[in-house]
Amino acid sequence: MRTRVAIIGAGPAGLLLSQLLHDRGIDAVLLEARDREYCEHRQRAGMLEQATVDVLREAGAADRLDREGLVHHGIHLRYAGRDRHIDFPSRTGGRSVTVYGQTEIVKDLIAKRVAQGARMYFDAPVTAIEGIDGDAPRVRFLRDGVEEVLECDLVAGCDGFHGVSRGAIPADVLKTYERVHPFAWLGILADVAPSTDDLIYAHSERGFALHSMRSRAVSRLYLQVDPDADLADWPDERIWAELRERLALPGWTLDEGPIRERSITPMRSFVAEPMSFGRLFLAGDAAHIVPPTGAKGLNLAVADVRVLARACGEFFLAGSRAGLDGYSDACLRRVWRAEQFSSWMTTLLHARVDASGFDRRCQEAELAYVADSSAAMDSLAENYVGYTWAD
Ligand code: FAD
Ligand code: DHB
């Protein structure tokens, strides 16, 4: 089998790249380890920056997003019985964010690619990537348990944090940076109308809580839990009781409903540099992970593939390697901005059992500063909607 770009992984990064390449007339084959059903139902992120919505529109994959996405003009910062609404458009030159589940983006992109007759193989785990330091890389994968080889010009490693692509970069070239946060998030999807207009990010001594949503009838909520927490210890009543406590505000009530899905996600900050080597290009979680507090993971994945698709266009259609050569640096600038913001939001909002009295007071002072200072709210808003450089 032969193609120009071998794309590994059918998460948002791989699927969107396959669409953007198709739109430029560049042939690609997508290989995904899991089945379609699994990819379409993996509950994850939901908050999209304006730039992410714009790329999905550009890819012609935003019809349902435009109909069903919930546009938000700010967030609530809630702590110590206070609720500060931070308005985005007035602080960011008119920008806002949209809630639309990652599952729905994945479903929309898969449906579109299938309708276009894409060469996209599910249940096809990649086992090895060879020859990326030469002109003719080869990707080995399994189909029905039988090994096959895909020959290509470029490899796009969009296979998430646990994929095989990153490992194909020689160890003496790859440098990794990591911070494991001492928390995890327990996330639920509940059949109940959201109890809020905009998302609520809440800090309390019991821990962090986030009230998000998926539609006017479905709420998405998260709780900070210990990294070794077990779902078996979290029956529905305990989850709701904890959410009520942490989100509490005089005069406000949290509506409850049947919990449809639940999962626990560890929190990690991670960056691999460089994001490319020879003819291999990493995109999305394969290259970097952010703790979810800043809602950046999915947005970074989309930003990477926008840069990569453009660079592939220059390479195949104009014969220039400049875009590919600049890919890693172009992405890493945005990645590190998001890493810093996500770590900052995480530290600001989570409760640490091991924090000293001094650290706790500093955290309280910082929360009050963010909720009181217009400059601090401007900064949070600018980063939340997606910081962009003037050049
Ligand atoms: P992924 O979505 O991970 O896709 C990678 C794909 O590659 C997968 O389909 C995988 O099966 C496939 N793959 C792996 N190995 C191979 C192989 N060898 N061969 C072929 N295919 C392979 N972000 C937020 O902003 N908010 C959240 O609440 C949030 N929750 C999250 C919860 C979890 C459990 C995880 C893991 C991530 C979460 N994120 C969240 C982050 C966000 O979902 C990711 O940043 C986003 O999914 C990145 O997309 P991606 O396409 O790079 O990777
Ligand atoms: C969602 C997830 C996040 O991590 C976040 O910061 C905001 C919203 C969500 O799943 O809706």
Image: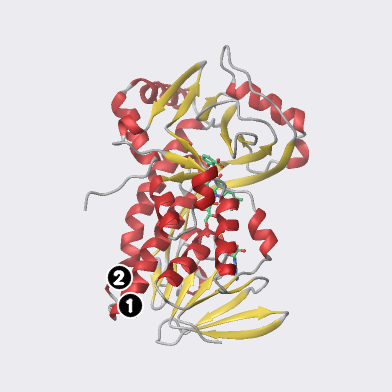
In percent of width and height, residue 149 lies at: 58, 86
Q: Is residue 338 above or below residue 361?
A: below
Q: Is residue 353 visible?
A: no
Q: Is residue 66 above or below residue 9?
A: above
Q: Is residue 227 visible?
A: yes
Instruction: Find residue 59 and name its label.
Output: none
* Number of numbered discs overlaid on the protein picture: 2
Q: Residue at x 68, y 71 (%)?
A: 123
CB under 8 Å between discs 1 and 2: yes
Q: Residue at x 41, y 48 (%)?
A: 339
Q: Residue at x 52, y 43 (%)?
A: 69
Residue behind mark 2 = 323
In percent of width and height, residue 47 lies at: 50, 43
- 33 vs 138, left or right, is right
In percent of width and height, residue 256 lies at: 70, 27
Instruction: Find residue 315 and name its label.
Output: 1
Q: Quadrant of residue 250?
A: top right
**Badge 2 amino acid:** Gly
Instruction: Give 159 or 43, whichever is nearer the viewer.
Output: 43
Instruction: Give 335 or 390, whichever is nearer the viewer.
Output: 390
Find the distance from the CA under tag 1 to the CA under tag 2.
7 Å
Disc on the earlier residue, 1 or 2: 1
